[in-house]
């Protein structure tokens, strides 16, 4: 089927729910409305009110009840309407979902997925454009996944639904309907914990996630650089092997993310390269990211989100070392 | 042993009914006919501004917009009930309250255009900022009320939230703080029957939202939200009560006549007939009926008012659209000082012209 990211995710939900009647979908406006981005469209009509729940407007209880459902033998897939509002459930995720397995020595586990749209570039209101991948990755215990295309979105969601871990599933709003792709109709998994080499190259490694994957592809195509582009796909646990192998091969590494520069994903990747491959580098590792400040309102976002021009200039700089 | 240890009930108020008839026993004496004309004009102004916003959004001249049409009665009535030293604490749909309290219209529009510059609070304007995360503003309202109480300036705080927002923890926690510390706080629930696609009846099993006050040990009341005079009276009385150390919860019963925001399609989840039925309860209609029956209003006055309001709105939009954005302001309003590392990022951005020229 030809699918954009929304239809791919919708189809993945359908297959997962058909396969296992323990799967329930819950969240604000996910039932009759089919979710504000229509990712859960039609599921309520097909699977009914016991499996597709419009919850009261309360994120802490959406995530908290999902934890209880998971421990109680169900497999909840919770939708949080926008990334900014997931912070109202932050305590449930970090204090409980991330730690239940450790706390009970794997006797009580939390097989659940919490999905949310992330990142900006779509001119919307405050709190609708944040890129929170590192918040959830920092303490350990939560798997954090972020597809950048319809194929990966479907395969990663299905993989997540088959695991026995809490998975934070980040969906870049800007990529929901940006392009379509041919994807298999049937079930398939995309491995979690494995990065995707989007394009092989010898002169430079560019590592990106989510919205920045198409931006990097665009910049590399425009510059004609022989760059290796790595889409992380899984933020936590990080695919260190792919990163280090590529860094050793090309000797130049740039990390591009939409989240703010300081204490971001780039810092983690750069540190691992410094530890394991520094003597094989020809240039200092470079980070391209949004400024170290909260995401602004839409009037200023074009000055905030890294664009093709910013990545292109960075490519010139790193290649000139 | 068994005995009843708690009992309470919720009262409902309406001063002017759908036909413009007044309940004299409840009618607040200070409300002159002139004041009713003023209320009518404010409601019409809020509606005109709302219609303009919708058309600007459709032309791509403002970002996502949350319409207020249908809720003019409760927004104008409650805003006019605020005293000189009182504050209001909005969620995200209270454009009518901003308007009545004297926020510059060009700044309101600038905010809709997506600039923090529109959110700069004019000196002496007693309000907090628009809060997009539902109900998260209410603890601020409770804390602000505590501060006003300590500073003994006689002010009270009016916090707004939607029916959906009453499901959030912050809503309950704020009511509870207010009751425990006896702060001058009134929380007004704009019960407009919908939280995006979720109807009020599915949001909670509680029969009224006003009764949620009981668990916090404070008083709750209901009022017809499309009755501007009724809302004015109930909110004014509630603010006076709150000033005495008795915080209150006011549930106004109204209806979201339009889409949730310009990104929403309500035909997916509600019937046209339901919306149609609420048209009879329009907050402007009943006041106009009343004013016409007393020969205080006619078509000429209506036309004059509309022309005057349209001009004010158009002028304000022009001012907002001539605003010159300054991306360095993003960096300069984060801390009370400029950290060296942030300044480095700013300098790099400036040197690159914020990466706005086309890639070579
Ligand atoms: C904490 C939080 N969760 C979710 C949202 C997304 N959202 C925006 S408005 C809304 C519904 C609000 O309903 P209600 O409180 O009744 O206010 P109304 O929109 O009817 O004025 C939702 C779910 C949000 N803004 N904040
Ligand atoms: Mg509502």
Image (spheres, helix red, strand yellow):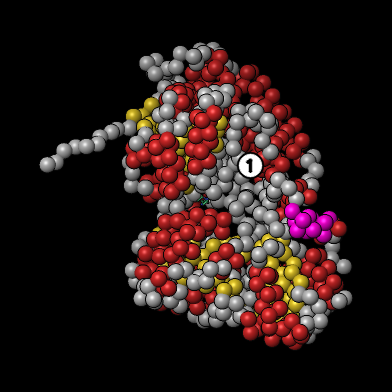
Considering only vertical position in the picture, is B59 above or below A63?
A: above
Q: Nearer the viewer, residue A69 or A320?
A: A320
The structure residue drawn at horizontal position 67% and vertical position 27%, both measured from the top left corner, is B309
The structure residue drawn at horizontal position 68% and vertical position 32%, both measured from the top left corner, is B122
Residue B302 in the figure: left or right of residue A140: right
The structure residue drawn at horizontal position 41% and vertical position 44%, both measured from the top left corner, is B172
Residue A20 in the figure: left or right of residue B132: left
* Mark 1 Cα-neighbour bin, 10 Å: few <14, some 14–19, many ≥20: some
Considering only vertical position in the picture, is B276 above or below A290?
A: above
* Coordinates of residue A226 in the picture (x, y in percent): 80, 82
**Residue B75 lies in the magenta-colored region:** no
Q: Nearer the viewer, residue A223 or B240?
A: B240
User: Quarter of the image holding residue B171?
Assistant: top left
The structure residue drawn at horizontal position 81% and vertical position 65%, both measured from the top left corner, is A309
**Overall secondary structure of the magenta stretch?**
helix
* Coordinates of residue B41 in the picture (x, y in percent): 59, 23
The residue carrying mark 1 is B54
Magenta-colored span: B339-350
Indicate the chain on which mark 1 is placed.
Answer: B
* Coordinates of residue A62 in the picture (x, y in percent): 43, 58
């Amino acid at each position: 089927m030809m699918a954009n990211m929304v239809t791919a995710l919708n189809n993945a939900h359908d297959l997962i729910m058909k396969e296992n009647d323990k799967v329930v979908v819950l969240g604000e406006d996910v039932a009759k409305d089919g979710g504000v981005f229509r990712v859960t469209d039609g599921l309520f009509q097909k699977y009914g009110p016991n499996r597709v729940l419009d919850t009261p407007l309360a994120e802490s209880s959406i995530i908290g009840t999902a934890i209880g459902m998971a421990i109680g033998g169900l497999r909840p897939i919770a939708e949080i309407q926008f990334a900014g509002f997931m912070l109202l459930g932050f305590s449930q995720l970090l204090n409980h979902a991330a730690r239940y397995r450790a706390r009970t020595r794997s006797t009580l586990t939390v097989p659940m997925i919490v999905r949310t749209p992330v990142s900006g570039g779509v001119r919307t209101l405050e709190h609708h454009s944040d890129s929170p991948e590192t918040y959830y990755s920092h303490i350990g215990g939560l798997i954090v996944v972020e597809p950048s295309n319809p194929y990966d979105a479907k395969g990663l969601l299905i993989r997540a639904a088959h695991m026995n871990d809490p998975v934070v599933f980040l969906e870049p709003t800007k990529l929901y309907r940006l392009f379509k792709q041919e994807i298999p109709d049937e079930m398939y998994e995309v491995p979690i914990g494995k990065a995707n080499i989007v394009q092989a190259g010898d002169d430079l490694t560019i590592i990106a996630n989510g919205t920045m994957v198409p931006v990097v592809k665009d910049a590399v195509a425009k510059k004609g650089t022989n760059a290796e582009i790595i889409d992380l796909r899984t933020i936590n646990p990080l695919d260190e092997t792919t990163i280090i192998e590529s860094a050793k091969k090309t000797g130049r590494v740039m990390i591009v993310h939409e989240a703010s520069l300081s204490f971001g994903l780039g810092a983690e990747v750069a540190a691992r390269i410094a530890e394991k491959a520094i003597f094989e580098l020809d240039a200092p590792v470079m980070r391209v990211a949004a400024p170290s400040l909260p995401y602004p309102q839409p009037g200023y976002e074009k000055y905030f989100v890294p664009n093709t021009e910013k990545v292109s200039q960075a490519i010139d700089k790193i290649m000139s070392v | 042993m068994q005995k009843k240890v708690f009992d309470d009930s919720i009262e409902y108020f309406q001063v002017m009914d759908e036909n413009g008839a007044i309940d004299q026993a409840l009618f607040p004496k200070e409300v002159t006919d002139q004041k009713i004309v003023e209320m009518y004009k404010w409601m019409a102004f809020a509606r005109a501004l709302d219609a303009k916003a919708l058309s600007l959004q459709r032309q791509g001249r403002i970002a996502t917009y949350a319409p207020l049409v249908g809720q003019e009665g409760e927004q104008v009535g409650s805003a006019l009930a605020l005293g000189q030293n009182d504050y209001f604490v909005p969620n995200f749909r209270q454009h009518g309250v901003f308007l009545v309290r004297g926020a510059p219209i060009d700044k309101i529009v600038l905010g809709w255009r997506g600039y923090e510059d529109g959110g700069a609070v004019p000196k002496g304007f007693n309000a907090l900022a628009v809060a997009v995360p539902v109900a998260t503003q209410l603890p601020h309202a409770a804390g602000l009320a505590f501060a006003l109480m300590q500073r003994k300036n006689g002010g009270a705080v009016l916090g707004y939230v939607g029916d959906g927002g009453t499901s959030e923890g912050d809503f309950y926690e704020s009511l509870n703080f207010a009751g425990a510390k006896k702060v001058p706080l009134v929380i007004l629930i704009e019960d407009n029957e919908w939280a995006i696609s979720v109807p009020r009846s599915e949001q909670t099993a509680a029969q009224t939202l006003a009764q949620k006050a009981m668990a916090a040990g404070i008083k709750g009341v209901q009022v017809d939200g499309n009755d501007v005079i009724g809302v004015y009276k109930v909110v004014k009385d509630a603010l006076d009560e709150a000033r005495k150390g008795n915080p209150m919860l006011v549930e106004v019963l109204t209806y979201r006549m339009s889409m949730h925001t310009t990104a929403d399609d309500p035909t997916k989840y509600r019937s046209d007939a339901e919306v149609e039925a609420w048209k009879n309860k329009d907050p402007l209609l009943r006041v106009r009926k009343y004013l016409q029956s007393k020969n205080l209003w006619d078509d000429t006055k209506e036309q004059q008012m509309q022309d005057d309001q349209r001009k004010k709105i158009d002028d304000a939009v022009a001012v907002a659209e001539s605003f010159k954005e300054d991306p360095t302001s993003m960096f300069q309003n984060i801390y009370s000082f400029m950290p060296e590392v942030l300044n480095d990022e700013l300098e790099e951005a400036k040197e690159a012209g914020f990466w706005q020229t086309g890639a070579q």
